[in-house]
Image (cartoon, rainbow, N blue to C red):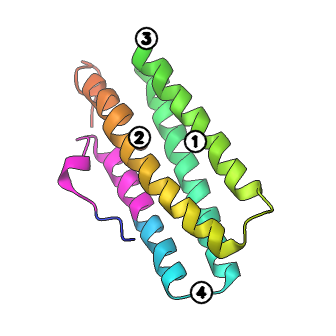
Amino acid sequence: MEFIWKKEYETGIDKIDGQHIKIVNLINKLNDAIRDRSEDTIISGIILDLKIYAISHLVYEEKLFKKYNYSGEDFEKHKRTHDNFRNQISDFIGNPNYLPKELAYKISLFLIDWLKTHINETDMKFAKFLKSTATYEQ
Ligand SMILES: [Fe+2]
């Protein structure tokens, strides 16, 4: 299934949007590799790239949380969703019961669902907070 980027996913924070688009491109690369029945090593490589890049995106957001003193209930919830993501992705990759292609398919579905929720429910709130912060510059 192709993940089609839509304007409604934009938070208005250029760097965050750029990183989300890169995650979408990697998800589509993974889906292409599954569709084309690429070798397991190629599929595993894309999964690893996705894991590393998605986690570096969370770290980037967490740096902004600190820099702009994001706090309160929205911050706590956002931070928890990041921690859950790190646990879930490690559980997937560390599970020896999955064959690479089966794993790739499950990870792709998981990431599509996760990214949509991540953008709509948590990043939009954070973007609103950032835009209302006097010291924030794009
Ligand atoms: Fe994000």
The residue shown at (46%, 36%) is 61
Labels 1 & 3 near each other (Cβ < 8 A): no
Q: Amino acid at mark 1?
A: Phe
The residue shown at (60%, 36%) is 84
The residue shown at (40%, 52%) is 19
Labels 2 & 3 near each other (Cβ < 8 A): no
Residue 113 position in % (x across, y down): 43, 51
Q: Is residue 2 above or below residue 110?
A: below
Labels 3 & 4 near each other (Cβ < 8 A): no
The mark lying in front, picked from 3 and 4, is: 4
Residue 74 position in % (x across, y down): 40, 19
Q: Is residue 76 magenta?
A: no
Residue position marked by numbered label 4 in the rendering: 38
Query: Rounded to the nearest whole Å, what is the CA distance between mark 2 and mark 3?
Result: 18 Å
Q: Earlier in the sequence, mark 1 or mark 3?
A: 3
In what quadrant does ligand 1 lie? top left
Query: Rounded to the nearest whole Å, what is the CA distance between mark 1 and mark 3?
Result: 20 Å
Residue position marked by numbered label 1 in the rendering: 85
Residue 43 position in % (x across, y down): 62, 76
Q: Amino acid at mark 4?
A: Ser
The residue shown at (52%, 27%) is 79
In terms of secondary structure, what is the magenta stretch mainly? helix
Question: Is label 4's Cβ within 8 Å of ligand 1?
Answer: no
Packing grade of label 2 (10 A; few <14, some 14-19, many >=20) is some
Packing grade of label 3 (10 A; few <14, some 14-19, many >=20) is few
Q: Amino acid at mark 3?
A: Gly
Labels 1 & 2 near each other (Cβ < 8 A): yes
